[in-house]
Image (spheres, grey):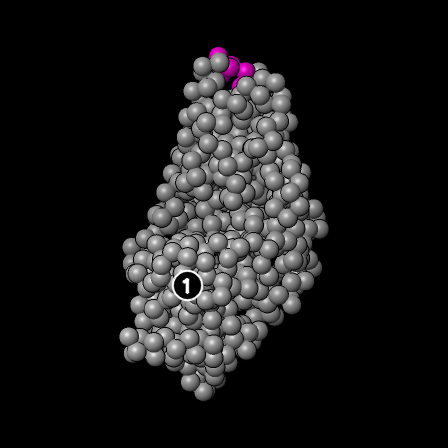
Amino acid sequence: MEKIIHPKQLIEWKQKSLSQRLVFKKIIVVSSGTCGQASGSLQIIEALDRELEKRNLKKTIRIEISGCHGFCELEPNIIIYPEGVFYKKLKPKDIPKILDETILKDKIIPSLIYDEPRTGHKVSNQKEIPFYQKQMRLLTEKNFRINPTNIQDYIVLDGYQALAKVLFNMTSKEVIDEVEASGLRGRGGAGFPTGKKWEICRRVSSDVKYIICNADEGDPGAYMDRSLLEGNPHSVIEGMIIGAYAIGASEGYIYVRMEYPLAVRHVTIAVEQAKKVGLLGNSVLGSEFKFDIHVVQGAGAFVSGEETSLMASIEGRRAFPRQRPPFPAQEGLWGKPTNINNVETWANVPLILNKGADWYSQIGTKKSKGTKIFSLVGKINNTGLVEVPLGITLKEIIYDIGGGIKDNKKFKAVQTGGPSGGCIPADMLDLPVDYDTLTKAGSIMGSGGMIVMDEDTCMVDVARYFLNFTQEESCGKCVPCRVGTRQLADILTRITQGNGEEGDIKKLEDLSRTVKAGSLCGFGQTAPNPVLTTIRYFRDEYEAHIKEKSCPALFCKDLIVYYIEPKKCVGCLLCLKKCPVKAISGERKKVHVIDQELCIKCGACLEVCPPKVGAVSKYTGKKRDRILKKSSVERAEK
């Protein structure tokens, strides 16, 4: 590829690439992000390549390997253009039929198209699938059409046009004013206004300035940043170059965790391509502006996502947060002014500069502009990556996009903002999703994790899980976080084991407030959120665990028993054969019995008992106590 030394060459590249694509009658785009590859997309690509070769179709049918299409529940999937046919959960054996029927005869294969879980309605066109219809995919839409390892694919879709506009037609102040007018807020969690952050850094006088892309995404169940880097890394790079021009930086770093090997590979390739064609280096796009980017791999410590810890890691020191002020914009990497934004924030920048602040500011709410990408996971039918306008309600995300709760169970709560976020209950489903409303509800936007929970979820155990996570990931530098999260986790564990005491709820509340007030960085300051919100909205579950020694959700192993109902058992032997510890005894066509002292409460007996029989039940509270007492007496008599 030749060097681009003038913006006109971008247009020429675009036109040339478009003309090259016109020779293809159809393009088959394979979703091949991390989730796709884990589900078998590489085998689908091999099968497509083999079958196209066999049919001599390679000159008219093009295979395009893209990043994640968002619908992770249905991986591996493909989209066939120009019709937009969407096929799901494919296996290599499906490929010959797809080529023979859909590619050559334009016939739809009913067994491979989307089947709406609640209505049974079948949809073949990707744009008509409810999961996509309710979204506003400003950042993720290009994932359908871009090979992340091919810079030309990005340029075809107006890539680096915003950069050309900025370098040759705008001053640094004008760029910042445009970003500020758009209302873009940082997508890393805190939601600080991006333009304001840039302006602070721009005003600091220094011979050297840095910018950093924070891709150290560590929230359980979150993969928004990973997906953008895997699917469209050039959007992030372009945003960083524009940001560097705006604040006067000459060097940038993309800090990405090493557990994201595909993201690391794709962003490294993209950086090298950008250098090769003159979009990075001593003369960006032939201008006098020089800027370079380095990719740094983090070791996976959750606290590295905190900006001062991240900078310490880049410098080769232990990832410890430091007190602020001074803020990074004043004194950051190697003591120089530094601007840090996360992946999604940088990816928004070219969009704003291309389409204008007025256009962008019309999307979202008064104080929360634009779209937000969420990883929608948990007890929901349509798990995946969704991009929605800020201000959309939780109900719209969970039911219209997510397709509702699995197995027609009741929605109970949703955790937003990762381990430092909060749990929002069912009676707040109409809550708008924006920075300020979530904060008022006791949660946070965070980087965009969204974990859906159903009626079988124990909220005390949820708080225990997240506090165990934060306790393990605490860097240990400050006492409130290091000791406080351990104490919170210990109390919650004790409660879920049936050893809760009167006054434990107040202890949890008081200790949570102390940890929030005394911790050095945002990690410790938000760590108690899962505890405070579950107590706030699900206090009755805490009281049941403590006062009645029962788990209303029938989840906590120490507070439940599995029991075979004598009047329902048909003696089919299924549970007896499945029990891993031989705690079940009985003969064929005779009532089976569970030895409660041997039972490890794995639930295998409940899973294999035929639904029509329904002989295995779970009990907690007084019923559990009676069953245990009866079992103990029977064992003593034997």
- 501 on left or right of 414: left
Residue shown at 42%/79% (left/top)? Answer: 625
- 262 on left or right of 231: left
Which residue is nearer to you in this view: 557 or 358?
557
Residue shown at 62%/36% (left/top)? Answer: 126
Measured as percent of width and height from the top left, residue 420 is found at 47, 65
Asked which secondary structure carries label 1, the reply is: loop
- 595 on left or right of 409: left
Measured as percent of width and height from the top left, residue 573 is found at 38, 55
449 to 321, vertically: above or below = above
Looking at the rendered structure, the kind of residue marked 1 is: Val
Which quarter of the rendered picture does the C terminus lie within?
Answer: bottom left
Q: Residue furthest bottom?
A: 502
249 to 219, vertically: above or below = above
Which residue is nearer to you in this view: 204 or 629?
629
Mark 1 surroundings: few (<14), some (14-19) or many (≥20) residues within 10 A? some
Res 480 → quadrant = bottom left
In the rendered structure, which segment of residues is drawn in magenta? 56-61
Measured as percent of width and height from the top left, residue 91 is found at 46, 32
Which quarter of the rendered picture does the N terminus lie within?
Answer: top left
460 to 67, vertically: above or below = below
Q: Which residue is mark 1?
A: 591
